[in-house]
């Protein structure tokens, strides 16, 4: 019994309906996305290695920077790989706004619960 889900005789390559210039542009875009995401990740790792936890203000700023950079990477991935970047700005806002609101809600819960836990811990000791 022959499988019909295998690509036979390079039919996939024959089904590509773009020129070599369009293919080169697509590859360039993929390399740019890879380079940008790698750069942001390298900066995050570098910050984690360089900065120490001993300084309270600096470590708080570093944590917030990590959160912002992670959200930037996530938004960029959605815009590029889910092709949302090619849509109208109103559609982008309509799709991204609920996620931003949800993330703000999660941060609010984490901060208020964290402070509540710290206050209860400080009164016990």
Image (cartoon, helix red, strand yellow):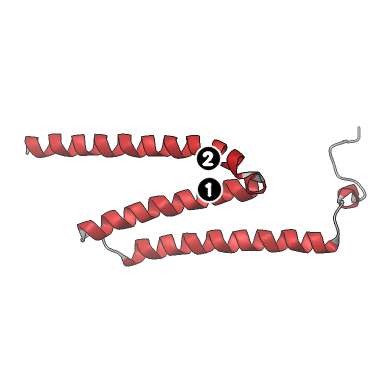
- x, y (%) of residue 11? 90, 48
| Any part of residue 82 in sight | no
- Of the numbered discs 2 and 1, the one sitting upstream in the chain is 1
Residue at horizontal 64 percent and vertical 44 percent from the top: 88
Q: Tell me the residue that label 2 is attached to.
A: 96
Extreme residue in the top direction:
1
Position above or below: 46 against 9? below
- x, y (%) of residue 93? 54, 40
Alpha-carbon span between mark 2 and mark 1: 8 Å
- x, y (%) of residue 104? 38, 39
In front: 117, or 89? 89
Residue at horizontal 45 percent and vertical 40 percent from the top: 100
SS label for mark 1: helix
Q: Tell me the residue that label 1 is attached to.
A: 75
Residue at horizontal 63 percent and vertical 48 percent from the top: 85
Residue at horizontal 88 percent and vertical 36 percent from the top: 4
Q: Quadrant of the C terminus?
A: top left
């Amino acid at each position: 019994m022959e499988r019909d889900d295998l690509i036979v005789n390079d039919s996939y390559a024959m089904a590509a309906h773009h020129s070599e210039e369009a293919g080169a542009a697509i590859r360039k875009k993929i390399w740019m996305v890879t380079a940008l995401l790698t750069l942001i990740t390298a900066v995050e790792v570098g910050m984690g290695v360089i900065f120490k936890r001993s300084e309270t203000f600096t470590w708080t700023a570093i944590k917030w920077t990590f959160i912002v950079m992670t959200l930037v990477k996530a938004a960029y991935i959605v815009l590029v790989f889910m092709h949302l970047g090619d849509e109208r700005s109103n559609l982008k806002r309509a799709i991204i706004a609920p996620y931003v609101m949800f993330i703000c809600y999660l941060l609010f819960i984490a901060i208020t619960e964290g402070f509540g836990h710290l206050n209860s811990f400080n009164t016990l000791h």
